[in-house]
Image (cartoon, rainbow, N blue to C red):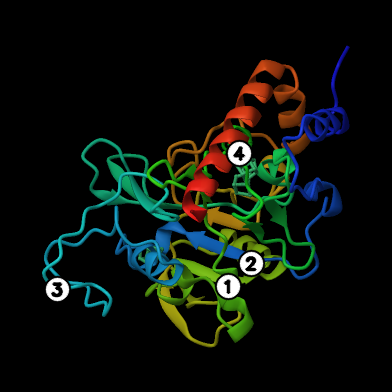
């Protein structure tokens, strides 16, 4: 006999594991792109690998440590203590919500080329239109906003089961193993800055327009327009936001003929463009246009021992650590 999501939730609630839960599968409420959905367009052909986006992500999300490159003090950010040593993080972690990585082939001298070339790629939560992470979260700690589509996290609800880590097709959510009261950590698009007309810090402090913020419908149009540009000509690339009057005329580099995120995993609010194919940039070529929530749930319910182990371990661990921290 199979077990569906409802059965699982009843079972979990009946066993007392979801006592403080607000059980509501958030993906069901927003199956399509919300009308005011916001996101980011990253264009690797404009990226110079300066990592200003990483520095300012840490600054505005208060995740210092385990981070930021820079040994020689060449980036004068006021929050960087002059004599402090910073390391380059190798990947996303509980301290790094946004990372710039580098692809290289052969001699690695030609920017945005697969032949003897290299390319940068910026990785963080893609804010899926149908987020698998939120769909499997048994307590509604991860939610997709029906207004702007941001997938946000509430540590007060989280029981630490780490389903979201298993479910995310992009390997984004990280767990604070180092913390006595661990939380899940991932990019939330700097949504805490929206109320003051702010937006994602990685876009605000990107000097070349490689990362721009805006409404997803506008970002999609901008991305599609870029695919029609003639290589070698100049285009006024907007800085910071998609509708910005501040632009930087830049010579157009040949694009790989695809905008990542238009379709992948049912579509995402983070879109990417590059001069090389996305499998070279570390994206799993097996990710299709099919949305993941039901896929993931079907997979997870086939291994009930995992469900039981994760939920029990997560709930107990969470209660123990929370009790300790409250003493
Ligand atoms: S990329 Fe992963 S963590 Fe981000 S919304 Fe999609 S499923 Fe959730
Ligand atoms: S660890 Fe579990 S409870 Fe916490 S956000 Fe992830 S799926 Fe939800
Ligand atoms: S700030 Fe902009 S140019 Fe610099 S690494 Fe980040 S995306 Fe690339």
Q: Secondary structure at mark 4?
A: loop
Image quarter (top left, top right, bottom left or bottom right) of the N terminus: top right
Most foreground residue, 17 or 73 = 17
Q: Quadrant of residue 232?
A: bottom left
Name the residue beneath numbered marker 3: 82
Q: Quadrant of residue 117?
A: top left
Residue in the picture at 42% in, 49% down? 94
Mark 3 vs mark 2: give the one in front.
3
**Which is more N-terminal, label 1 or label 2?**
1
Name the residue beneath numbered marker 1: 192
Residue in the picture at 87% in, 33% down? 6
Question: Measured from the top left, where is residue 248 in percent x and y?
Answer: 42, 79
Question: Measured from the top left, where is residue 260 in percent x and y?
Answer: 59, 49
Question: Measured from the top left, where is residue 20 in percent x and y?
Answer: 74, 48
The answer to whether residue 216 shows anywhere in this view is yes
**Which is more N-terminal, label 4 or label 1?**
4
**Which is more N-terminal, label 2 or label 3?**
3
In the shown orientation, is residue 42 left or right of residue 311?
Answer: left
Q: What distance separates the C-alpha of mark 4 from that of mark 2?
A: 23 Å
Q: What distance separates the C-alpha of mark 1 from that of mark 4?
A: 23 Å
Q: Secondary structure at mark 3?
A: loop
Name the residue beneath numbered marker 2: 219
Q: What distance separates the C-alpha of mark 3 from that of mark 2?
A: 38 Å
Mark 1 vs mark 4: give the one in front.
1
Q: What distance separates the C-alpha of mark 1 from that of mark 3?
A: 28 Å
Q: Answer yes or no: do the residues labelled 1 and 3 have beta carbons within 8 Å?
A: no
Name the residue beneath numbered marker 4: 168
Q: What distance separates the C-alpha of mark 4 from that of mark 3?
A: 38 Å
Residue 35 vertical placement versus 302 (above, below): below
């Amino acid at each position: 006999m199979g077990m569906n999501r409802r059965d699982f939730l009843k079972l979990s609630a009946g066993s007392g594991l979801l006592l403080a839960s607000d059980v509501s599968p958030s993906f069901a409420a927003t199956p399509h792109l919300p009308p005011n959905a916001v996101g980011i367009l990253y264009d690797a052909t404009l990226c110079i690998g300066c990592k200003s986006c990483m520095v300012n992500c840490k600054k505005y999300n208060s995740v210092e440590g385990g981070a930021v490159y820079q040994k020689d003090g060449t980036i004068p950010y006021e929050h960087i203590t002059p004599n402090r040593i910073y390391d380059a993080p190798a990947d996303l972690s509980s301290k790094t919500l946004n990372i710039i990585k580098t692809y290289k082939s052969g001699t690695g001298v030609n920017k945005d080329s697969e032949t003897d070339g290299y390319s940068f790629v910026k990785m963080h939560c893609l804010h899926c239109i149908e987020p698998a992470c939120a769909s499997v979260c048994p307590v509604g700690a991860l939610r997709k906003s029906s207004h702007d589509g941001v997938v946000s996290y509430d540590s007060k609800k989280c029981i630490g089961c780490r389903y979201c880590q298993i479910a995310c097709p992009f390997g984004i959510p990280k767990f604070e193993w180092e913390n006595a009261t661990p939380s899940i950590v991932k990019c939330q698009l700097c949504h805490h800055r929206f109320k003051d007309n702010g937006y994602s810090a990685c876009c605000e402090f990107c000097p070349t327009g490689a990362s721009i913020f805006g409404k997803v419908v506008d970002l999609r149009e901008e991305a599609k327009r870029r695919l029609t540009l003639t290589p070698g000509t100049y285009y006024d690339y907007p800085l910071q936001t998609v509708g910005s009057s501040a632009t930087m005329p830049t010579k157009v580099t040949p694009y790989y003929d695809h905008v990542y995120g238009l379709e992948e995993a049912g579509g995402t609010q983070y879109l990417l463009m590059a001069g090389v194919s996305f499998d070279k940039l570390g994206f799993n070529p097996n990710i299709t246009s099919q949305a993941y929530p039901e896929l993931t749930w079907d997979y997870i319910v086939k291994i009930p021992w995992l469900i039981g182990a994760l939920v029990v371990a997560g709930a107990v661990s969470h209660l123990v650590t929370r009790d300790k921290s409250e003493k």
